[in-house]
């Protein structure tokens, strides 16, 4: 594989990303596939990482949310690896939406390129490798995780597997070290992806052992060497904060709501599949799905071609390997009696995963490779004169099947309101609480975005867990202002209470405004504008 070939493949997937991700690809700074709580969370996360990297990088996990706790970045995915890519955009433009979409778009290109490199490393032709990249990068089961930045950057999984293939075939220490570097990049980009990669590597090593390859642990350690160990250090440094979060917060995974709906495995919002579903099913499939897990018709056909035995030589081994990776991942992702998740969810590493259907992202690596092998075999059967035509037809069919543009986007921007700008100009440090607080997490994620204007501590936060203190506090704050809520805020050491009058119903705001007037010795008005007010909280 030459640099020119890699550059061509990268340009190919970049062009497809521009087309298939339209209009996000042409309006990355002002649109999003959604503005749900996860989008808010990971917009804030990338912005926090960019802020921390130039202020206190050694304390990056001590994020400003869930005051008075520290280590709060470890309550969810940290996205530090993605922040290395997006932070320069944040520093130059200040546009958090642009940074978020840039990470997502780049991950699509790199997923395609990583799968291409993997296919080439196992001996497939350029055409088959292009198919491999298209399937992994753009199949609905992976592509429509676009707005979930903790699940989008899966690109380092195929790169790692590609390096491992070369290492076991050629025995060069540098290839093992390259694989370790890719492992670290995956852990930094997505801990979910790191877990999926560990499972994939375990299957890879078991497959090698069954083929008779000696594990030769002593030799592997020598090949890894000091350089390889140092390459793993950044990934290993992520472990203590998460272990501490598990210990201090009592984080444990349960089997509550773990099964994906059966419709999920048939769900996809591509134009072609939506049309087919509308003809086959009277009841809506996509609306009842909990995830889009349908890999596509063309990939299924190509996988079938690979699996039914129309391969020979070394590719038979690769069919077995990537078939095994696919099956293992599906056993994790599936629900019902076929799933093995209820028997393993509590194990170390696996207990990081809350939604096991996400293991389908690992299955897509196996499906992509199998589809590429199937495509190569079809091209070989067609003969030398028609080989290129077969590959071109497969690529065209895949792109046509995966097309869903224009994607359903909404305008999205994160810009400081006058209240936030006023707070940013105040003497620091201070701590903020914002009202109203409702029953949904959306309030807290909006306030996390507000905090990006000043990066001071806030009582608000959203993640995969919530401290007991905040469970009680958020319930109390629904009745703000009253004796209990003001006492709790005072005990925590809150400096300012921001009351967003525009977020209340008019009748509700009139009641809240009248109640605020009953506590002049505790709430002193510091700033007021049409959309909100800032009160200094005086302690008893």
Image (cartoon, rainbow, N blue to C red):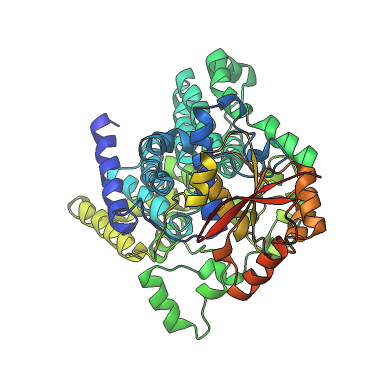
Q: Using the rendered image of the protein, determine whether residue 151 is visible from the camera's viewpoint.
A: no
Q: Position of residue 323 (x, y in %)?
A: 53, 50
Please determine whether, in this image, residue 476 is positioned above or below residue 125.
Answer: below
Q: Using the rendered image of the protein, determine whether residue 247 is visible from the camera's viewpoint.
A: yes
Please determine whether, in this image, residue 182 is positioned above or below residue 257.
Answer: above
Looking at the picture, tell me which residue is in the foreground, 106 or 110: 106
User: For the N terminus, which image quadrant?
Assistant: top left
Looking at the picture, tell me which residue is in the foreground, 297 or 70: 70
Q: Position of residue 7 (x, y in %)?
A: 26, 36
Please determine whether, in this image, residue 84 is positioned above or below residue 435.
Answer: above
Q: Residue at x 30, y 42 (%)?
A: 125
Looking at the picture, tell me which residue is in the foreground, 243 or 159: 243
User: For the C terminus, which image quadrant?
Assistant: top right
Residue 103 in which image quadrant: top left
Q: Position of residue 465 (x, y in %)?
A: 71, 50
Counting the numbered discs, the total is 0
Q: Position of residue 164 (x, y in %)?
A: 49, 31
**Residue sitting farthest toward the left:** 385
Q: Residue at x 50, y 22 (%)?
A: 177
């Amino acid at each position: 594989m030459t640099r020119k070939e890699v550059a061509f493949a990268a340009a190919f997937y970049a062009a497809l990303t521009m087309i298939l991700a339209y209009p996000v690809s042409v309006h990355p700074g002002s649109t999003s596939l959604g503005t749900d709580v996860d989008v808010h969370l990971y917009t804030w996360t990338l912005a926090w990482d960019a802020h921390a990297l130039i202020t206190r990088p050694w304390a990056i996990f001590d994020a400003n949310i869930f005051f008075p706790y520290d280590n709060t970045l470890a309550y969810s995915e940290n996205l530090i690896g993605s922040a290395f890519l997006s932070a320069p955009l944040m520093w130059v433009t200040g546009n958090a939406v642009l940074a978020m979409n840039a990470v997502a778009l780049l991950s699509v290109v790199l997923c395609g390129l990583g799968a291409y490199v993997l296919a080439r490393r196992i001996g497939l032709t350029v055409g088959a490798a292009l198919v491999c990249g298209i399937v992994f990068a753009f199949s609905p089961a992976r592509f429509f995780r676009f707005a979930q930045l903790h699940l989008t950057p899966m690109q380092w999984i195929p790169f790692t597997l590609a390096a491992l293939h070369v290492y076991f075939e050629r025995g060069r220490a540098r290839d093992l070290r390259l694989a370790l570097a890719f492992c670290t990049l995956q852990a930094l980009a997505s801990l979910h992806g790191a877990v999926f990669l560990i499972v994939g590597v375990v299957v890879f090593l078991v497959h090698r052992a069954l083929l008779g390859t000696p594990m030769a642990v002593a030799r592997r350690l020598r090949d890894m060497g000091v350089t390889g160990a140092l390459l793993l250090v950044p990934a290993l440094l992520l472990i203590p904060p998460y272990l501490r979060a598990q210990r201090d917060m009592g984080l444990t995974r349960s089997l509550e709501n773990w099964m994906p709906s059966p419709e999920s495995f048939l769900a996809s919002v591509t134009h072609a599949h939506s049309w087919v579903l509308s003809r086959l099913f009277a009841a809506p499939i996509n609306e009842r799905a909990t995830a889009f897990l349908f890999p596509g018709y063309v990939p299924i056909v190509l996988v079938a071609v690979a699996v039914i035995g129309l391969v020979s030589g070394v590719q038979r081994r690769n069919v077995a390997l990537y078939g095994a990776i696919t099956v293992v991942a599906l056993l994790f992702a599936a629900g019902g009696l076929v799933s093995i998740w209820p028997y393993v969810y509590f194990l170390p590493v696996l207990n990081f995963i809350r939604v096991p259907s996400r293991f389908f992202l690992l299955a897509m690596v196996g499906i992509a490779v199998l589809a590429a092998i199937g495509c190569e075999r079809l091209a070989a059967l067609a003969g030398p004169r028609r080989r290129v035509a077969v590959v071109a037809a497969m690529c065209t069919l895949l792109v046509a099947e995966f097309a869903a543009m224009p994607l359903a986007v909404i305008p999205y921007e994160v810009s400081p309101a006058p209240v936030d700008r006023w707070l940013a100009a105040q003497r620091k440090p201070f701590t903020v609480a914002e009202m109203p607080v409702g029953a949904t997490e959306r309030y807290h994620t909006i306030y996390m975005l507000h905090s990006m204007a000043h990066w001071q501590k806030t009582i608000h936060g959203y993640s995969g867990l919530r401290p007991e203190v905040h469970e009680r506090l958020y319930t109390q704050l629904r009745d703000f202002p009253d004796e209990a809520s003001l006492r709790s805020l005072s005990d925590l050491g809150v400096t300012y209470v921001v009351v967003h009058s525009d977020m209340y119903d008019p009748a509700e705001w009139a009641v809240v405004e009248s109640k605020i007037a009953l506590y002049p010795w505790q709430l002193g008005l510091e700033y007021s504008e049409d959309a909100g007010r800032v009160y200094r909280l005086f302690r008893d």
